Image (cartoon, rainbow, N blue to C red):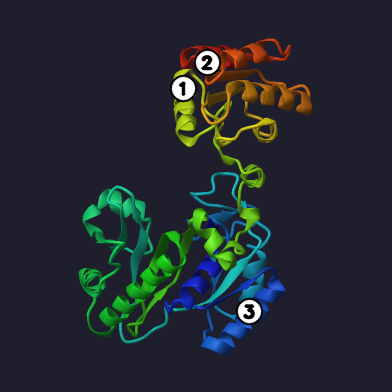
């Protein structure tokens, strides 16, 4: 589950991570009030206005309607309302949103932290995530903060620092010091970075996150270390332990079909292809998507209905897939292990009749317990549904359906 920057920063702050202070707003009027309150609390006289959407690249992104960037600087209270008006309600297009963009419903009014002082401010990159190959958490850091880390990794990989943390023993003091040292820090800035890394790791573990990305981490001109931005992803499987974090979910930022699928306990991810697929089991779903590509099609979605598929789940799957206008055919690929193939076949027939006329061809491949009985039920149903037993047979029927 992704959360907004302002939510991520509050989470970090609760674990002792120093952040760029800010106040969320949803209108030009509340933006001005937020700026005045921020001025009173922090003394800032310049204000950074940030669009709050679940996508990166906001600073370089453009609001379709006004041409404004997604992150702008207001140098006075008078500018806050006007610049907020140019972002709020608009559609922000970034490198991660695609051309359709995302509507901006909230903005963050943040303090200016690039103030003059004893030395030049410096931006760093810092993230914590799970390295599945090594079975460890990994801290990634770089002196090249504020940039696209993918570009840094591609062109100058030697500038990426990695420190693996054994989850059995946790982050050790020497590891945080090692990262700070490799970033070239010294004196008070070194001590601040060590404290920052420790607090960030505690937040990562304490919230059951799958990713923390702070870009940039700023060393201010007076050697403070703070998070200027924050991207946080919480492990969905751990949300039952974090009711407070579950409440931060913003459904408006998620694909409506994926939200609808979750309500029916379906694992659904929308893709850009032309063949809808409905499968029981994630591994079989991946194999089915490969099969669709080999047959000349492109998968329109990933949809796992689980081991206990029945008429209700199949109908819910149908309704979700059919909302995608790109779908030219639907492939149902079921292995009858936990549930018998004849029961699945009856479920497909019942779901088809409940929905009514389905405008695209449906291929049902059944294998496992009572596969032949299931195929017979499909073939004798009188509906526009064809059955298959083998993967090759199903692939051939998909190819025929989309050609």
Q: Residue at x 56, y 37 (%)?
A: 306
Q: Secondary structure at mark 2?
A: helix
Q: Nearer the viewer, residue 395 or 346?
A: 346
Judge left or right: residue 158 versus residue 121: left
Of callouts 3 and 1, which one flags the residue occurring earlier in the amino acid sequence?
3
Judge left or right: residue 171 versus residue 261: left
Point out the image quarter for the C terminus: top right
- Quarter of the image where one finds residue 109: bottom right
Tell me whether the residue at label 2 lies in contact with that at label 1, contact meaning CB atoms closer than 8 angstroms: yes
Tell me whether the residue at label 3 lies in contact with that at label 1, contact meaning CB atoms closer than 8 angstroms: no
Residue 149 visible: yes
Residue 403 visible: no
Q: Nearer the viewer, residue 87 or 20?
A: 20
Percent across and percent down for residue 338 are 53, 31
Query: Mark on residue 23?
Result: none
Of callouts 3 and 2, which one flags the residue occurring earlier in the amino acid sequence?
3
Q: Nearer the viewer, residue 366 or 370?
A: 370
Q: CA distance from mark 2 to mark 1?
A: 9 Å
Query: Mark on residue 34?
Result: 3
Q: Residue at x 38, y 55 (%)?
A: 148
Tell me whether the residue at label 3 lies in contact with that at label 2, contact meaning CB atoms closer than 8 angstroms: no
Q: CA distance from mark 3 to mark 1?
A: 54 Å
- Residue that badge 2 annotates: 394
Q: Secondary structure at mark 1?
A: helix
When the figure is inspected, residue 81 is found, relative to residue 102, above or below; the finding is: below
Crowd tier of the residue under label 1, counting other residues whose Cα lies within 10 Å: few below 14, some 14–19, many 20 or above = many
Q: Residue at x 29, y 69 (%)?
A: 171
Judge left or right: residue 122 versus residue 316: left
Judge left or right: residue 245 versus residue 138: right
- Residue that badge 1 annotates: 291
Crowd tier of the residue under label 3, counting other residues whose Cα lies within 10 Å: few below 14, some 14–19, many 20 or above = many
- Quarter of the image where one finds residue 160: bottom left
């Amino acid at each position: 589950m992704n959360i907004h920057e302002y939510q991520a920063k509050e989470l970090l702050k609760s674990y002792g991570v120093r952040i760029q202070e800010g106040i969320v707003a949803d209108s030009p009027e509340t933006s001005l009030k937020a700026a005045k309150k921020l001025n009173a609390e922090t003394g800032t006289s310049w204000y950074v206005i940030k669009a709050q959407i679940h996508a990166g690249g906001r600073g370089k992104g453009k609001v379709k309607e006004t041409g404004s960037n997604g992150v702008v600087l207001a140098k006075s209270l008078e500018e806050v309302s006007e610049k907020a008006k140019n972002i709020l309600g608009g559609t922000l297009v970034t490198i991660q949103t695609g051309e359709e963009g995302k509507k901006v419903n909230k903005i963050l009014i943040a303090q200016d932290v690039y103030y003059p002082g004893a030395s030049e401010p410096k931006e760093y990159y810092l993230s914590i995530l799970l390295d599945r190959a090594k079975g460890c958490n990994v801290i990634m850091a770089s002196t090249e903060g504020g940039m696209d880390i993918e570009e840094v990794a591609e062109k100058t990989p030697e500038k990426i620092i990695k420190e693996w943390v054994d989850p059995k023993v946790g982050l050790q003091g020497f590891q945080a010091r090692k990262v700070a040292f490799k970033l070239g820090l010294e004196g008070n800035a070194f001590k601040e970075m060590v404290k920052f890394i420790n607090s960030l790791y505690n937040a990562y573990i304490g919230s059951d996150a799958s990713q923390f990305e702070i870009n940039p981490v700023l060393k201010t001109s007076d050697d403070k270390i703070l998070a200027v931005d924050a991207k946080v992803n919480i492990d969905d499987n751990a949300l039952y332990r974090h009711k407070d974090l579950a409440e931060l979910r913003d459904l408006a930022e998620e694909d409506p079909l994926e939200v609808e699928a979750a309500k029916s306990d379906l694992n659904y991810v929308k893709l850009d292809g032309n063949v809808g697929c409905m499968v029981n089991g994630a591994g079989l779903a991946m194999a089915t998507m490969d099969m669709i590509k080999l047959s000349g099609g492109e998968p329109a979605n990933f949809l796992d209905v689980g081991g206990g598929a029945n008429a209700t789940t199949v109908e819910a799957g149908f309704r979700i897939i059919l909302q995608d206008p790109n779908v030219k055919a639907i492939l149902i690929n079921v292995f009858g292990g936990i549930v018998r193939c004849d029961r699945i076949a009856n479920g497909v027939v019942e779901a088809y009749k409940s929905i009514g006329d389905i405008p695209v061809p449906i291929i049902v491949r059944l294998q496992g317990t009572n596969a032949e009985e299931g195929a017979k039920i499909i073939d004798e149903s009188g509906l526009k549904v064809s059955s298959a037993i083998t993967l090759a047979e199903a692939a051939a029927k998909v190819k025929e359906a989309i050609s």
